[in-house]
Image (tube, rainbow, N blue to C red):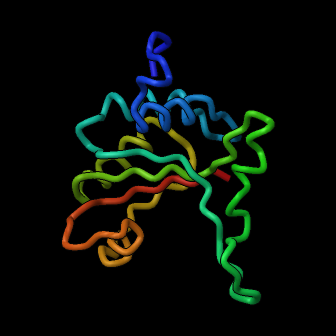
Amino acid sequence: MTEALRLRDATVQDIQFELLRRTKFNALDGERVRDSLLKHRHLWHAVLLDRPGVPNYADPSHLLTAGLIKLRDLPDNLWNADTLFVLTPSRSDAEQLMAVAQAEDWGGEATVHSDQEETDRALGTGRQEYGLLSIWWD
């Protein structure tokens, strides 16, 4: 998001990029990753920086463990997220983008999700050939 762009005029993707730009911890340099993604815009549809919660199978409930950690940290002006999800037009594009991430040393643990049914379920869609790259920073 450029300095001249007002928040009310920003797209949701612009806002996600601003959250990414502001994030810097351990090996994640959000501004560098954002700049690289913008250079390779042809390889992706959408980008989301998140920290998904995890189910507690021993004591199931509707709230996921650590699922609201971002909400907890908002009063401290912190977007507490550690996983970048990148939706790509195809698995091949996800693999190409993972190669970019490795070549440009984005850090983190990169995964191209290869189970199309799992990806479709996570996206709430089907019969699409989307690719999905995730990068997790510890």
Residue 31's place in the image compared with 93, above or below, is above
Q: Residue at x 69, y 46 (%)?
A: 80
**What number of labels is visible?**
0
Farthest bottom residue in view:
58
Q: Percent position (x, y) of residue 89? A: 23, 53
Left of 64 or right of it: where is 119? left
95 in relation to 22, above or below:
below
Against 6, residue 102 (above or below) is below
Relative to 61, does residue 12 appear above or below in the rendering? above
Q: Quadrant of residue 133?
A: bottom left
Q: Position of residue 47 (x, y in %)?
A: 41, 45
Q: Between residues 25 and 102, which one lies in front from this camera angle?
A: 25
Which of the pair 134/15 is nearer the observer?
15
User: Residue 65: percent from the left, percent from the top?
Assistant: 72, 70
Q: Residue at x 19, y 72 (%)?
A: 127
Q: Identify the residue shown where x is 31% and y is 55%.
A: 95
* Residue 38, quarter of the rendered image: top left
Residue 120 falls in which quadrant of the image? bottom left
Residue sitting at x 61%, y 39%: 28
- Hey, which residue is sitting farthest top in the picture? 4
Instruction: Left or right? Give the position of 59 relative to 38.
Output: right
Q: Residue furthest front?
A: 8
Q: Position of residue 22 (x, y in %)?
A: 62, 29
